Amino acid sequence: MTPEHIKSNLESWADIINFINKFDDPQWIDWQKLALRFMQYGIDHNFNHHFRVGQSMRTLVFSTLDHYGLEYEPRVTVVITPPETIRLIYTPSNPAPREEDELEYELIYSDAMPTFQRFLNHLWEMTRSEPLPSNMKAPKHKFTAPVLSKNDSCVSSWFDKF
């Protein structure tokens, strides 16, 4: 990954944090707090160096692209619902994405974070030619949601597409 790509990723995270901080309506405060907590987790784990983030209202979208704007590229979408719910959606590359191609979990925050990291690891492996950075390796503990593997029937078709 080039220094320019990393700089673009870091800037995207700063832009999203600025966007989240602009929510000053009291009805968004709980969402804002959870969204900032989620983003800080990503920064603490160096995801901001390896992934670009964008948004659509209360939805965050993570990719390995080096530019703004997704069309049919693989991504991890995060929907934040206070007080503690995180919906994670892994969407593989597909000219016409279908729900059955996606892998989705709705989890409480503490359970969502290891699964989010696993989704990012999978996204990296599916979209980047270089090996997964050592600081991106998923934690070695039990996941509350299934772990993606090449032999997993729900994702085996993804491996055929790449």
Image (cartoon, rainbow, N blue to C red):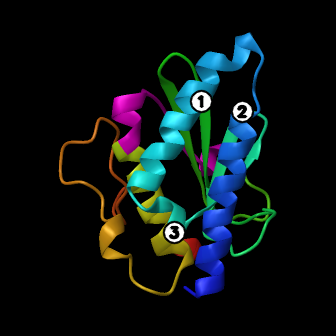
- For residue 55: magenta? no
Left or right: where 137 falls relative to 7: left
- Indicate the amino acid at tag 3: His
- Indicate the amino acid at tag 1: Ile
Query: Is residue 98 shown to the viewer in this render?
Result: no
- Rounded to the nearest angstrom, the CA distance separating label 3 from label 2 is 22 Å
Residues at marks 1 and 2 touching, judged by CB atoms closer than 8 Å:
yes
Q: Nearer the viewer, mark 3 or mark 2?
A: 3
* Mark toward the start of the polypeptide (3 vs 2): 3
Within the image, what quadrant is residue 19 found in?
A: top right
Estimate the x, y position of residue 147 in percent, counting from the top left: 33, 50
Q: Mark 2: few, some, or many residues within 10 Å (few <14, many ≥20)?
A: some
Left or right: where 8 falls relative to 34: right
Q: Residue furthest top?
A: 27
* Mark toward the start of the polypeptide (1 vs 3): 3
- Indicate the amino acid at tag 2: Arg
Q: Tell me the residue that label 1 is attached to.
A: 80
Estimate the x, y position of residue 68 in percent, counting from the top left: 79, 66
| Vertical placement of residue 139 versus 160, above or below | above
Q: Tell me the residue that label 3 is attached to.
A: 49
- Rounded to the nearest angstrom, the CA distance separating label 1 from label 2 is 7 Å
Q: Which residue occupies 60% across, 65% down?
A: 10
* Mark toward the start of the polypeptide (1 vs 2): 2
Query: Is residue 132 shown to the viewer in this render?
Result: yes
